[in-house]
Amino acid sequence: MNMFKRLFKIGEAEAHSAIDKLEDPIKLTEQGIRDLKKDLDKSLQALAEVKAMAIRAKNDVETYKNKASDYESKAMLLLKKGADGQIDSAEADRLASEALVKKEEATGQMNRSKEEQERFETSVAQLDVNVKKIRSTVSQYENELKTLKARVKVSAATKNLNKQLSQVDASGTVAMLEKMKDKVAQDEALAQSYGEIANESKSIDDEINKVLEGDSSQIKAADSLAAMKAKMGLDKKD
């Protein structure tokens, strides 16, 4: 765990530099997680080995316990045979004594195996706590790394968008629109001016004919009236 902390510990100057480049903390975190997983593999291997020794010690305890019980039974059987006269009593006592010595040896080995079993089981419990802690830490950092990567993507996208927006020349666009408005207004005024000039440029003949158009009608009407009066004999000369 201390090694992992050292891997994740960055100096103050390096931290400021890493913050400027968001990919650096991500790479450091990924490397730290890889190293932590290596520690987890080693801890799991150590846990398995110590568990195996605890199991073996437990089996030895049972084996030596059975041996001690067996030697005790044999010693009792030998004494019984000696008492029953099946074998020489002195020989029975000697063999029974040897069996009891073997029983004591087995009992001693059983006690030593039991101590080893307890010691190994204590180590197993400690290693199991460390393994669970490392697993939890790996899971925590992997989740935090996912969040960090997502934040980096959002930050990069936001940064690029803001950069693009900052490069838009709003004042220049407004100025261009104003120029376009002025140009349109100028073109409209010019068109109106050409229209007025066109109206002023009508031929003088058109104006004369327009003015005399009414007089011609009056002259024609007077002539028609005089002709009608003459026809009706109403035209009397003084």
Image: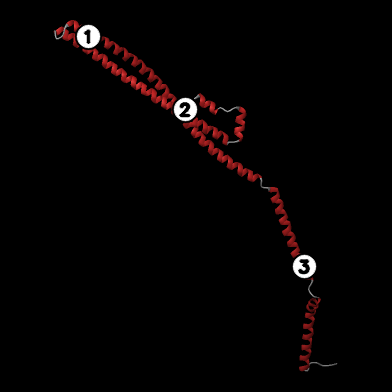
Tell me if label 1 and label 2 are in contact, CB under 8 Å: no
Q: Which residue is mark 2?
A: 39
Image mark count: 3
Image quadrant assignment for residue 94:
top left
> Tag 2: residue type?
Asp
Mark nearest the camera among 3 and 2 is 2
Residue lying at 39% horizontally and 24% vertically, measured from the top left: 49
The residue tagged with tag 2: helix, strand or loop?
Answer: helix
Real-space CA distance between mark 1 and mark 2, rounded to the nearest whole angstrom: 55 Å
- Per the rendering, the mark at residue 23 is none
Depth order, front residue of 30/220: 30
- Per the rendering, the mark at residue 196 is 3
> Tag 3: residue type?
Glu
Q: Which residue is mark 1?
A: 96
Q: Is residue 48 left or right of residue 196?
A: left
Depth order, front residue of 65/207: 65
Q: Position of residue 170 (x, y in %)?
A: 68, 48
Residue lying at 17% horizontally and 6% vertically, measured from the top left: 89
Q: Earlier in the sequence, mark 1 or mark 2?
A: 2
Q: Earlier in the sequence, mark 1 or mark 3?
A: 1
Q: Position of residue 52 (x, y in %)?
A: 36, 23
Q: Is residue 104 left or right of residue 188?
A: left
Q: Is residue 35 above or below residue 105?
A: below
Tell me if label 1 and label 3 are in contact, CB under 8 Å: no
Q: Is residue 88 left or right of residue 210?
A: left
